[in-house]
Every structure is written in structure tokens, then in C-alpha cells.
Amino acid sequence: MPGTINHPRIAFTVGPLQYWWPRAVLLDFYERVADSPVDTVVLGEIVCSRRNEMKHPDWLALARDLSNAGKEVVLASQALIMSESELRSVRGVAEQEEFAVEAGDASALEAIALARKTQGKHLPFVLGPHINVYNREALIEHAALGAGRWVAPPELPLTAIANVNPADNRVRGVEGDIVTEVWAFGRIPLSFSARCFTARHHRLQKDACEFRCRDDADGLLLSSSEGEPFLSLNGTQIQSAGIHALIGEADSLRRAGISRIRLSPCSKGFMDVVACFDAVYNHEASASEALERLRALPLPGTLVNGYIHRQPGMHFVEPGAEAYDS
């Protein structure tokens, strides 16, 4: 039977939903998250402002419900801003004073800085995975702005992540050391565009897209000319076809000084995913056995983990291989 580990617990973050799920489905999902062992939940629309079933007051109400259930809640801003209305939405997220903010791009950093100046707000903010922090100097610069947590870009290997914010020489923020969070499960966001790839696939204009992305609960799979899964289309976002899964890297992450991982939602089996990671990371369960359980779930893609091991992202390295050698 798994037991409780002796070293510090690794905290779990449920990242923002990358897809457009119907409102009832979304609310049901977060009801189950509220009863799960995750520590932090990131809420908000990060991909496309046309996905507007959940408006700002709705996200705030959901955030309060999750907070009352004992979860830390962070509100995320959109990753690519293309209009004044989207910029106003970013400002709305930055100006609310109840919850910390995850900055999706530079416009969010500016809005957060303005809110701190005009309102005296001093909640540390989170540097989202789409902020280009690839070296220690960049993290130091953002820490001085008030960042308290850094979500490393998913394509960085663990050795590079550890060099940016080493376990024995943390970047110091305004209110303490910067915490590093690593993308540990979910399709990897690779790029954003002003063009909607899903609409283009259906031969529709972006502004008359008929909201086709609602038909793809985990994105629309794109295969190579050889028929192999290659990428996933998700509105204005391109993702990996494979599911990034660091189920076997808990020891390597700890040695690299990582104290928090991010699990990105998928439409089927996600609560089982959370249970598998919790069992391995925090209760001494077998990573190999958990991997087999993950592979048996109805996940939308095959498991990959190449990036963390300095390999092509489409590869999978079996549990036991070291991603970080201290």
C-alpha cells in the first residue's frame, strides 16, 4: 500500500481550461475539482474571447466557490490580445482584488503594474507559461515587478528550468523566493495566432466561426501525411497531439527544486489522472503502475515527455530515466 512520503509534498495546480466546454459541463468539472486533492485552480478564458459563455462575474463566482472549498484560486488572462475589448478584459482581471492573477502576456504585466500603483494591490502574481522567461536574468526582472511564481515554458528541459531558478540559489521576489511550477500533464500549447485554425479547417471566417471549437472537447487532431498524430487545433491555438505526462519524474523534479506541478484539464479521465499523480508524487506509489493506469484511460492522445529529458517532445522516456542529475 502506498504511504505518505517523508519529503515535502509537491503541490498540484489545475491549469486553466484550454478548450471551450459548455457551461454546464465546465461547472460540473470544477465541482469535481473542488473535491479533489489539488491545491490551486487557475480559472479564465486564455485562448479566444469569442468563447464567452462564462463572463468575468461568472468566473469570480466560481472562484469564490472553489476558494470556499479550500482551494487557492488564480485568475488567468488571455495569452494573445488582439483588440481593445480583449485588453479591457485583461484590465478587469488585473483590477479585481480578491484573487491573484496569472499573466498571459506582456499586456497583463502592464495592467497588473497599473493596478498595483493605483490601488495599492500587492498580491504576488503568477508568470504564466506563455511569458518568455528562458533565463535567470529574465526571471529576476519579472520578480522585481512582483511575480511570486513562475510556470516554466513546457518546452524547457528540466536542466534548463533548474538553471533559471536553482534549488540552492532561488531568485528572490518582492515577498519571498520565486516558486517554480512545471507543466506535468496535458497537451502542450505550442503557439497562438490571430487566425483561427479551427474556423479555417471548416472553411469559415474567424468572425463567423459558428463556434465550431465547441465540437472538439480536447481540440481537433491533425495528422501527418503518413497518418500519424502530429498536432491539435484549438481555435487560435496550436497544441501537441501527444499528452505531456511527467508521471515518472517526481524524484528528478524534487532534486531540481520543483515544488509544484501543473495538470491541464482534459474531457475524460482527468480526476483519475489527478489520483495517479497524487499517489506517485505524494504517497510513494509505483510510477510504472500509475503509467499503466494512465495508458488505460480514455485520454485524447498518447503520452509523451521528451522535452523534459532534452529530447524531441513527441518521445516518451519510461520511468526510471533521470531528467535531472544534480
Image: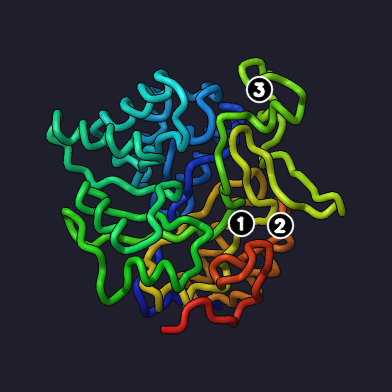
Q: Determine which residue is flagged by label 3.
A: 211
Q: Determine which residue is flagged by label 1.
A: 272
| Mark 3: secondary structure | loop
- In terms of depth relative to the viewer, which is nearer, 7 or 50? 50
Q: Determine which residue is flagged by label 2.
A: 297
Separation (CA) of disc 1 from disc 3: 29 Å
Label 3 or label 2, whichever comes before in sequence order? 3
Residue at the location (68% across, 67% down)?
A: 315
Residue 312 on image: x %, y %:
64, 66
Q: Amino acid at mark 1?
A: Asp
Colour style of the rendered protein structure: rainbow
Quadrant location of residue 195?
top right
Q: Is residue 97 left or right of residue 191?
A: left
Asked whether disc 2 touches disc 1, contact meaning CB atoms under 8 Å apart, the reply is yes
Near mark 3 (Cα within 10 A), the count class, few <14, some 14-19 or many ≥20, is: some
- In terms of depth relative to the viewer, which is nearer, 188 or 73? 188
- In terms of depth relative to the viewer, which is nearer, 63 or 16? 16
| Mark 1: secondary structure | helix
Residue 5 on image: x %, y %:
42, 77
Labels 1, 3: front one: 3
Residue at the location (40% across, 47% down)?
A: 131
Q: Is residue 212 left or right of residue 101?
A: right
Q: Amino acid at mark 3?
A: Phe
Q: Amino acid at mark 2?
A: Leu
